[in-house]
Amino acid sequence: MLEVMPAEISLTSEPSPASSAASIFRLYASLAATLPLDPRSGLGCKLLYAGEIGAAGRNLLYASNIAGAASLAASAHPAALREAMRDGVIDFLVNSLEEALRILKNEIRKRQTVSVGVSVDSHHLVDQMVERGVLPDLLPPIRRPDGEADLNRAQADMFLSQGAKRVAEPAAPFPHEAAGFVTWAVDGNFARWLPRLDACAHAVIPADDELRLRWLRLAPRYLGRLAQRQRGVLFSVEETLRFGAELGRLIDKQRSESGEELKVTIGN
């Protein structure tokens, strides 16, 4: 890979925000594998119960926002809720299931993306959902990375028996040999250059690959600070090489037109 890339493109293996973005992408692909994405609205009109707003819950909410679903999550920890609001993980913070349902029903009717956090313990929220007959379309993966369950067995079985689906465990969604999550960044003027680098990525992804094209289009909007200075998507080895060639052409064009040297960092 080094041999085919211009000198102005450097490679790095530092995880930085990429590790989080890669995890979010896997969850996003898992959502799409569980229920198909509508070409226009994604998972619009589908309700995801995302569980506790911790590290794993935040990633699932990010993925759900990009996929276009309506999401419901909870936490009894004010700091976690404030951070989720600040980072754009949730759109609304309310104190009760009733308030959350008013927002969710309205946005689901319009097939709009929305995420709502409720300031209660997540297990208590599930008890309330059962009592009120609230049936989510999607449930979180069986186990979070910290080993805790978001639902007890009886609650999960009840939801599943009425048609809810578990989000598939995150996995590599493509069979490409040595496929990897590739990131790109520039050394400054991010608002100007990152969209142009995104266009280089768009150019190597097949036009019918709605999963990755939707990610490229919406991840910068929903990932907030995670995407302010760096972007990424899953590429095959061949696509990575073609992406490097597209970047090389962009760099050469910029140099010839303005004399400005554009320095790009690619991570894997």
Image (tube, grey):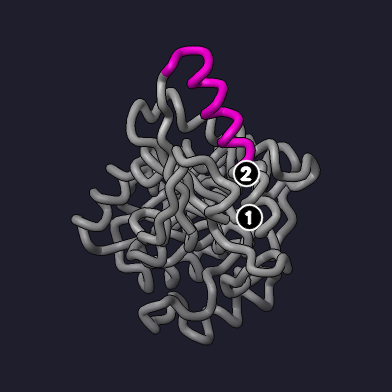
Q: Secondary structure at mark 2?
A: helix
- Tell me the distance, in whole angstroms, between the alpha carbons under discs 1 and 2: 9 Å
**Residue 85 lies in magenta, yes or no?**
no
Mark number displayed over residue 66:
none
Residue in the picture at 58% in, 74% down:
169
Residue in the picture at 55% in, 62% down:
27
Camera-nearest residue between 15 and 220: 15
Q: Secondary structure at mark 1?
A: strand
Magenta residues (range): 245-259
Residue in the picture at 37% in, 52% down:
117
The tag earlier along the polypeptide, 1 or 2, is: 1
Q: Is residue 182 left or right of residue 55?
A: right
Percent of width and height locating residue 75:
30, 62
**Residue 254 lies in magenta, yes or no?**
yes
Residue in the picture at 65% in, 38% down:
202
Neighbor class of circle 2 (other Cα within 10 Å; few <14, some 14-19, many 20+) is: many
> Circles 1 and 2: CB distance less than 8 Å?
yes
Residue extending farthest right: 208
Percent of width and height locating residue 88:
37, 43
Residue type at mark 2? Phe
Mark number displayed over residue 235:
1
| Quadrant in which the N terminus is drawn | bottom right
Residue type at mark 1? Phe
Percent of width and height locating residue 159:
60, 73
Identify residue for label 2. 243
Residue 170 in view, yes or no = yes
Camera-nearest residue between 199 and 92: 199
The image quadrant that residue 228 belongs to is top left
Helix, strand or loop: magenta stretch: helix
Camera-nearest residue between 169 and 80: 169
**Front label number (1 vs 2):** 2
